[in-house]
Amino acid sequence: MKENKYDDPVFFNKYSNMDRSKYGLQAAGEWHELRKMMPDFTNKRVLDLGCGFGWHCRYAIEKGAESVIGIDISQKMLDEAKSKTGSEKIQYICLPMEDIEFEPDSFEVVISSLAFHYIQSFENIADKINKFLTLGGDFVFSVEHPVFTANGSQDWYYDNQGNRLHWPVDRYFEEGDRKAVFLGEEVIKYHKTLSSYLNTLIKAGFEIIGIVEPKPEEKLLNTSAEMMDELRRPMMLLISAKKKQVI
Ligand SMILES: C[S@@+](CC[C@H](N)C(=O)[O-])C[C@H]1O[C@@H](n2cnc3c(N)ncnc32)[C@H](O)[C@@H]1O
């Protein structure tokens, strides 16, 4: 099932009020790490899957990309992306990423930020990306960490006083959909194990270049108790890979 939660007005408003939605990449907790994994964009053709407000599309253009196509299932997200975008080198297409079709070798770079946990099959998208990328092309993405998605509730366990006891990791090996609660709203997300992500990439013809489980930046750690709790479990998984062979 392809859920389009970001077009739900209530959810969209809540998402729009997050710091990362208002202030962009600098307010995204993982950006200090993801940025380091980004390839050289100079004169590259770039595809961004689940591009949302288009922050990474605009970053690629700022860094010299020749063109960027941003794909998103949500028209509301893309309307906002377009309103924030001045460059004609960026084209936004409203489409479930599962349905994308391009000619082989259409892009030198494919990126995706925090969107693959919304799709059921990572195999299908990895195979498509291998086809659309040129040999040696870069594939860099972030996704919610399997430790974060496994149980589904996406919340801590608390004691009677409301103290955070631990983060529940359960049903780890049971891949598939979860009714997660995000921003107080029920959202369908898909859990995959860590070995699934890695082996799928290898089978799809990619060489894995880097894997990061980002921790908050040092300067943010003392800003709140919640931020310190981010050191207790990984929330995101960042992977950079290169197309090594045609499958
Ligand atoms: C957490 S937001 C991330 C947005 C953006 N990549 C960023 O990091 O700022 C997830 C985005 O994925 C999009 N999305 C979810 N399922 C999708 C699908 N099947 N195809 C394309 N986009 C999808 C949502 O509409 C939303 O814009």
Image: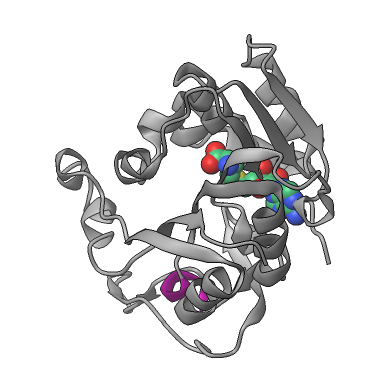
Toward the viewer: 182 or 184? 182
228 in relation to 76, above or below: below
Q: Which percent across, then down, holds residue 94? A: 82, 37
Toward the viewer: 222 or 99? 99
Toward the viewer: 94 or 83? 94
Q: Which percent across, then down, holds residue 219? A: 15, 38
User: Can residue 236 be seen by looking at this rendering?
Assistant: no
Q: Main secondary structure of the magenta part?
A: helix
Measuring 47% from the left and 80% from the top, which residue is drawn there? 195
55 in relation to 94, above or below: above
Determine the image quadrant of residue 209: bottom left
- Quadrant holding the N terminus: bottom right
In the rendered image, residue 44 lying in the magenta stretch gets the answer no
Chain part drawn in magenta: 146-151
In the rendered image, residue 149 lying in the magenta stretch gets the answer yes
Q: Which percent across, then down, holds residue 40? A: 41, 32
